[in-house]
């Protein structure tokens, strides 16, 4: 018995894709934007770490 052939599309970072697959230029543009987003996220995290370190409370004196 022969069954019908089915095509399954994988789920990528944006979920299942519908329509045509992006061409090289579109793919490159999307990846470059993603890289800029990651770089901004990294800068935000580094800034937060720096601010938290600067705001460290002074050690409390030991009570006698």
Image: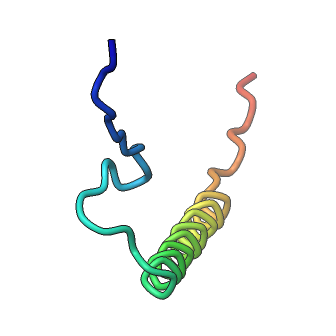
Toward which corner of the image does residue 20 lie, by quadrant? Answer: bottom left
**How many marks are shown on the rendered structure?**
0
Q: Nearer the viewer, residue 20 or 17?
A: 20
Quarter placement of the N terminus: top left
Q: Residue furthest top?
A: 1
Q: Nearer the viewer, residue 62 or 52?
A: 52
Quarter placement of the C terminus: top right
Q: Residue furthest front?
A: 1
Q: Position of residue 55 (x, y in %)?
A: 59, 60
Q: Position of residue 33 (x, y in %)?
A: 47, 80
Toward which corner of the image does residue 63 lie, by quadrant? Answer: top right
Q: Nearer the viewer, residue 14 or 38?
A: 14
Q: How is the image coloured?
A: rainbow
Residue 29, relative to residue 12: is it above or below?
below
Residue 5, relative to residue 32: is it above or below?
above
Q: Position of residue 41 (x, y in %)?
A: 52, 68
Toward which corner of the image does residue 61 lie, by quadrant? Answer: top right
34 vs 17, left or right, is: right
Q: In percent of the image, x 63 and y 67: which residue is there?
A: 46
3 vs 27, left or right, is: left
Q: Nearer the viewer, residue 11 or 23?
A: 23
Q: In percent of the image, x 37 and y 68: which residue is there?
A: 21
Q: In percent of the image, x 47 and y 85: which residue is there?
A: 29
């Amino acid at each position: 018995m022969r069954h019908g052939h089915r095509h399954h599309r994988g789920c990528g970072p944006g979920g299942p894709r519908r329509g045509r697959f992006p061409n090289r230029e579109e793919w490159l543009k999307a990846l470059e934007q993603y890289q800029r987003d990651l770089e901004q996220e990294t800068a935000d995290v580094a800034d937060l770490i720096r601010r938290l370190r600067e705001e460290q409370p002074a050690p409390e004196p030991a009570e006698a």
